[in-house]
Image: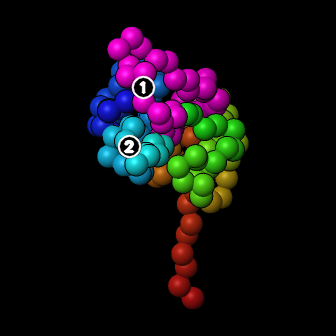
Amino acid sequence: YDASEELLQYRFDQFTELKSVRVTIEKGDKLCSTDGSVTQIKFLRPHGPHPAITILTADGLDSHVEHDISVRTKGLYSLIDHSRYSFTGTTDNTECSSRGTCDYDTGKCRCYDGYRSSDGEGGMGMIADCGYRFQEFFNY
């Protein structure tokens, strides 16, 4: 309950099936605090649905704590900060990110206009998946 952002990130990085997870403590300085805390956990890769996060209590957890610990999912708002909502990711593991066609002879994507290789998280990168939205700027 008193884990720092760095410790949480380290623990998530230990799951080999999760390629990329980003942990951010947005309110407070630890996972739990007396003033309340809000922690955001983004599952970036692999794409697609992930199992729900659940809270397990272990022996030795201070049982006289009067504060609630909860995980908010499926669009529910934070009990600490009502302006923050959970959301389900919108990425899927589809061929050429559904933004190009696959050349089966070379195994590479031919991206539609406006798309290029990505970093697997929506930014520009070297993965030939057409996952990066590229905007060209022209001077007339």
Residue 64, image x and y in percent? Answer: 42, 25
Q: Which residue is mark 1?
A: 64
Residue neighbourhood size for the residue with mark 1, other residues' Cα within 10 Å, grouped as few (<14), some (14–19), many (≥20): few
Q: Is residue 114 above or below residue 40?
A: below
Question: Quick check: 68 left or right of 109?
Answer: left
Residue 98 in view, yes or no: yes
Distance (Cα) linking label 1 and label 2: 13 Å
Q: Image quadrant of residue 58?
A: top left
Towards the viewer: 42 or 79: 79
Please, what is the dominant secondary structure of the magenta stretch? loop
Earlier residue among tags 1 and 2 = 2
Secondary structure of residue under mark 1: loop
* Residue shown at the point (67%, 53%) measured from the top left: 112
Query: Which quarter of the image is occupied by the N terminus?
Result: top left
Mark 2 is on which residue type?
Answer: Thr
Tell me the crowding category of disc 2: few under 14, some 14 to 19, or many 20 or more residues within 10 angstroms, Cα based.
few
Q: Is residue 5 left or right of residue 44?
A: left
Q: Position of residue 126 (x, y in %)?
A: 43, 43
Residue at 37% from the left image edge and 49% from the top image edge: 28
Mark number, residue 34? 2
Instruction: Point out residue 69 in the picture as x, y percentages from the top left corner.
Output: 51, 33
Q: Nearer the viewer, residue 46 or 130?
A: 46
Q: Is residue 137 above or below residue 34?
A: below
Task: Please identify the quarter of the rendering in which residue 14 is found.
Answer: top left
Is 43 covered by the magenta stretch? yes
At horizontal 58% and vertical 47% (from top left) the residue drawn is: 78
Q: Amino acid at mark 1?
A: His
Q: Is residue 65 magenta?
A: yes
Q: Which segment is the magenta one? A: 41-69
Q: Position of residue 130 (x, y in %)?
A: 59, 46
Please state if 18 lies on the left or on the right of 140 as rendered: left
**Secondary element at image label 2:** loop
